[in-house]
Amino acid sequence: MANLSALTNIWDNVKEIDLQPLRHEALSGVRLTIIGIPGSGRHTLAGMMRQDPVHADMATEAPVQILDLSEADQASRADLVVLLVDSRKTDFTREAELSRIWAGANRPLLVCINRFEDDDTALVIKTWVNWKSRRVVDGSILDIKFLTGQFASAVIDLLPGKHLALGRYFPLFRVPVAHHLINDTCLTNTAYSFSTGIAEIIPVLNIPLTVTDMFVLSKNQAFLVYKLGLALGLSTRWQDYVAEFGGVLGSGFMWRQLARSLVSLVPLWGILPKVSITYAGTYVVGQVVLQWYLTGRHLSRTQIRAMYSRALTRGKELGRNLMRRMPRLRLPRLHLPRLHLPQLRLPRLPRLRLTRLGLPLPRLVRTKRRPLTATPHNLACPQCGRSNAPDASYCQYCGEKLSPIEYNQPL
């Protein structure tokens, strides 16, 4: 949210009102090209991208263009070029030249160093640092953790606007794309909720923005369900998602939407609870669809409540961060002229005597002071007359110094 592209992405998600462009984006496909020398693992990487790490029996036949280094000119129409480098080589002149050409032409390029067990990794890293490529990843293409982590994250960043097609045609990217869509929608709804919360401080805009807030946030959550279905290879008909997830999400989240609208009616104080509820609700909506895809089962209401509670804590932290980043409003100082008021002298009131009013005067009674005596068990203070410990040097009540005396002798 700090840069202009993130703000533009948030606004694009808010103003979406039609599902047809999402369906067209998911079915349009994505053109990937892998360039490398024979033996570098080009076909292995293409096969790994077509397989689903979660479901071993699920694979696609998505086309991937595989070229040698000498055929790099044929990749001009690719949406993304993956330059696969064999780390066991010692001469990377041709790979470095292609990387500089593609980077200079501002074409999407990902340099992937395929690490083997018997290679000299330090030599490879020292070599490709100066290749001028924006993204370079280093790891084994047989490592699922590397492919779904660094490799998938780099591909998603280099293919904006192609995330739905990337996950639908290449199952390797489905779970990473799903997490990206969930986080993106959570950020969108949180930022929108925070901005309307600031505007709701104005009493005139409070209730209209609350109604609009409910509509926009609920719409974004519904669109997230449809986006996840398209990216995970599910049905393209939105009616199927209403029947599948409507009963699970509808009853519980209706009350949370109502709570969010009621909290937002409190100016300024309700911003932080509103932001946290928005984040938690959007996060749970996305996780319900993702967990159904991963396990084939719907989450129970107990699991949803536990997930919602954890997401609510993260939403509060995000809301506090947004509050800290909000610039403080400094009001200009008002210089008012000093007012010189005349001194007012109040008239003296006559003294009232109780005798003139016929009221009796209080009678003062003097109390007789008890004689000071000392016993083996106490030591009397000559000032206040209270008993102290026999070995005390000062009175514990008034602080008077106590002089030693003989017991059973009158003072």
Image (tube, helix red, strand yellow):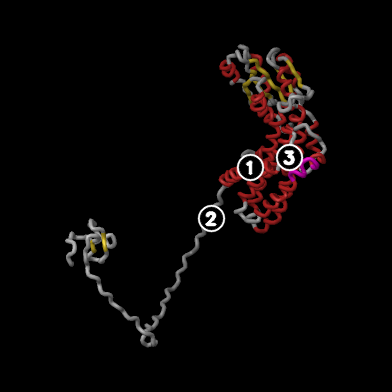
Q: Which residue is at a point 48% across and 64% down the rendered structure image?
A: 337
Q: Quadrant of the N terminus?
A: top right
Residue 16 magenta: no
**In the rendered image, which residue does mark 1 sit on?**
311
Amino acid type, label 3:
Leu
Distance from disc 3 to disc 2, alpha carbons, whole Å, reads 44 Å
**In the rendered image, which residue does mark 3 sit on?**
224
Asked whether residue 188 is in view, the answer is no
Asked whether residue 167 is in view, the answer is yes
Camera-nearest residue between 369 and 117? 369
- Of helix, strand and loop, which one carries label 2? loop
Is the Cβ of the residue at disc 3 closer than 8 Å to that at disc 2? no
* Marker disc for residue 356: none
Main secondary structure found in the magenta portion = helix
Camera-nearest residue between 178 and 153? 178
- Of helix, strand and loop, which one carries label 3? helix
Q: Earlier in the sequence, mark 2 or mark 1?
A: 1
Q: Place residue 284 in its image quadrant.
A: top right
* Marker disc for residue 332: 2
Amino acid type, label 2:
Pro
Magenta residues (range): 242-249
Give residue 240's position: percent from left, percent from top.
81, 39
- Of helix, strand and loop, which one carries label 1? helix
Distance from disc 2 to disc 1, alpha carbons, whole Å, reads 40 Å
Question: Vertically, is 354 above or below 285?
Answer: below
Residue 244 magenta: yes
- Which of discs 2 and 1 lies nearer the camera? The answer is 1
Camera-nearest residue between 40 and 300? 300
Camera-nearest residue between 288 and 393? 393
